Image (spheres, rainbow, N blue to C red):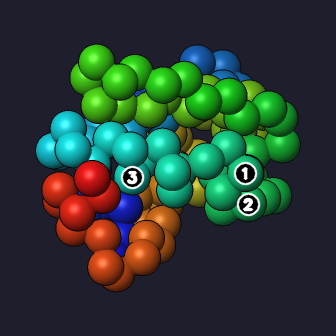
Amino acid sequence: MKLRDIAHSRTGDKGNTSNVSLIAYDPNDYDVLCTYATIDRVKQLFDGIVNGEVTRYELPGIGALNFVMTEALGGGVTRSLAIDAHGKSLSSALLNMDLPDDLRSGSNE
């Protein structure tokens, strides 16, 4: 099972900082996001891409997590030599993160 099976994402870029949010389709899956989309897992996923800090903000009222990643865009979207260094690419990679197969909406109660 992939993270994209229970959540979608929105992104934003500013300079060399990428902002990637995860929003649970079902509010019951918010705890799953909190459990599996940890700072450590996000840092590991983007090792070599995100060279700065990763900060996670929890928004339980809307069932979302927001990750702010510094030094993440190769100097900035307009300055980077990386192909498609925008946050949209980072969000796609994050949504591809593996989750245990036995997780299904509502099963984390």
Q: Residue furthest front?
A: 109
Q: Residue 76 location in percent, x, y?
A: 68, 29
Mark pair 3, 2: CA separation:
18 Å
Dot 3 corresponds to which residue?
32
**Residue 69 seen in render:** yes
The residue at 66%/57% (across/down) is 41
Q: Residue 63 location in percent, x, y?
A: 29, 31
Dot 2 corresponds to which residue?
44
The quadrant where residue 79 appears: top right
The quadrant where residue 4 appears: bottom left
Q: Secondary structure at mark 1?
A: helix
Mark pair 3, 1: CA separation:
15 Å
Compare residues 23 and 100 and report the one nearer the observer: 100
Sequence-earlier tag: 3 or 1? 3
Compare residues 12 and 78 and report the one nearer the observer: 12
* Amino acid type of the residue tagged 1 in the rendering: Asp
Q: Residue 48 location in percent, x, y?
A: 81, 58
Q: Are marks 1 and 2 in contact (CB under 8 Å)?
A: yes
Dot 1 corresponds to which residue?
40
Q: Are marks 3 and 2 in contact (CB under 8 Å)?
A: no
Q: Nearer the viewer, mark 3 or mark 1?
A: 3
Q: Is residue 61 left or right of residue 91?
A: left
* Amino acid type of the residue tagged 2 in the rendering: Gln
